[in-house]
Amino acid sequence: MGDVVHTLPAVSDIAGNVRDAQIDWLVENAFSAIPRLHPSVRRILPISWRRWRKSLLAPATRAEMKSARARIREERYDLIIDFQGLVKSALWAFQANGRKSGYGFGSARESLAPLFYARRVGVSRTLHAVERSRRLAAQLLGYRLDAPPDFGIHAPDFGWRPSHDRYAVLITGASRPEKLWPENRWLLVARTLLDAGLGLVWLWGSQSEASRAVRLAAQTDGDVPPFLKIHDAAAVLGRATLCVGLDTGFSHLAAALGVPTVGIYCDHEPGLVGITGPGYVASLGGRGATPDVAEVVAAVAPALPAGKRPAR
């Protein structure tokens, strides 16, 4: 999900620099709601690779994959860009009609991926993911990058609505246990937000995350939404006063929507995938450097309503 969010500015660049550009996006179906928010994306080509790879030989899987390949090959493209630089993404790009392109050897995230491209360009792996995607597209299409990143998306209309007009979203779940932050620390940060007059929304995406959200909400009088698809979660995130979250896709989506966002990194260095967006952002911690409550509260303070910031 983070990869999808980080590619949005490159799409904005292409639309703004290539006259009459028509952009289709091949994306994991679970995350297809994100490119649907971008007005310059003409057509979404969803695949369900994360589900398919668990049963590649099953007749139903093979039928779905055949249908997906047929949709991908319906048109001939002037250029096909693999922004992920992985073997799996390169393989799917390879099935489309058109000239395949991507990161060069030493630039791609997986060393074999460039073998599938007809055109390769070098982009430093020390750059943030957003900047890498932007530079990849700019070099392939021959334009200069003169403006800051434009994610190009806005919050959609509400589906589920929080009980408070002014609220903070807290995202306590992550893909691996190593990324989690202790619950007692979340409660202390929540108290700071409550003292600032904000309601709380504890966002979740899996059953284990839901159980944690219910526990934390019970101690903070917070809202726990039902399971929200990405479109509805974007509506809640995009209208928040503030978001505090772990290194997870929803945190990156909140920042892309312009919401002041503080990211907590417990098992990954934020340098190449830190929280980024047009509003206030902060990325704290890293591998072996779990941030403490004081660091998070200090990072949250600039985004709190005037007169509600904690004393230093």
Image (tube, rainbow, N blue to C red):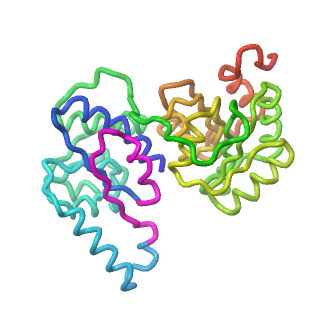
Question: 156 or 6: which is nearer to us?
Answer: 156
Q: Residue at x 48, y 50 (%)?
A: 1
Is residue 225 rendered to the left or right of residue 155? right
Residue 134 x/y as whole percent: 32, 35
Foreground pick, 112 / 17: 17
**Is residue 71 something one can see in this rendering?**
yes
Residue found 24% across the figure and 33% down from its top? 138
Work out whether residue 123 or residue 53 is closer to the camera in this orientation and state it: 53
- Say which quarter of the image contains residue 63: bottom left
Q: Position of residue 67 (x, y in %)?
A: 28, 72
In which quadrant of the rendered view does residue 264 lie?
Answer: top right
Image location of residue 253, percent across then percent down? 51, 41
Q: Quadrant of the C terminus?
A: top right
Membership of 36 in magenta stretch? yes
Q: Is the residue 132 above or below the residue 117 in the image?
A: above
Residue 99 part of the magenta-drawn span: no
Q: Nearer the viewer, residue 239 or 175?
A: 239
Q: Which residues are magenta?
A: 29-51
- The answer to whether residue 127 is seen in the rendering is no
Q: In this rendering, is residue 304 above or below 175?
A: above
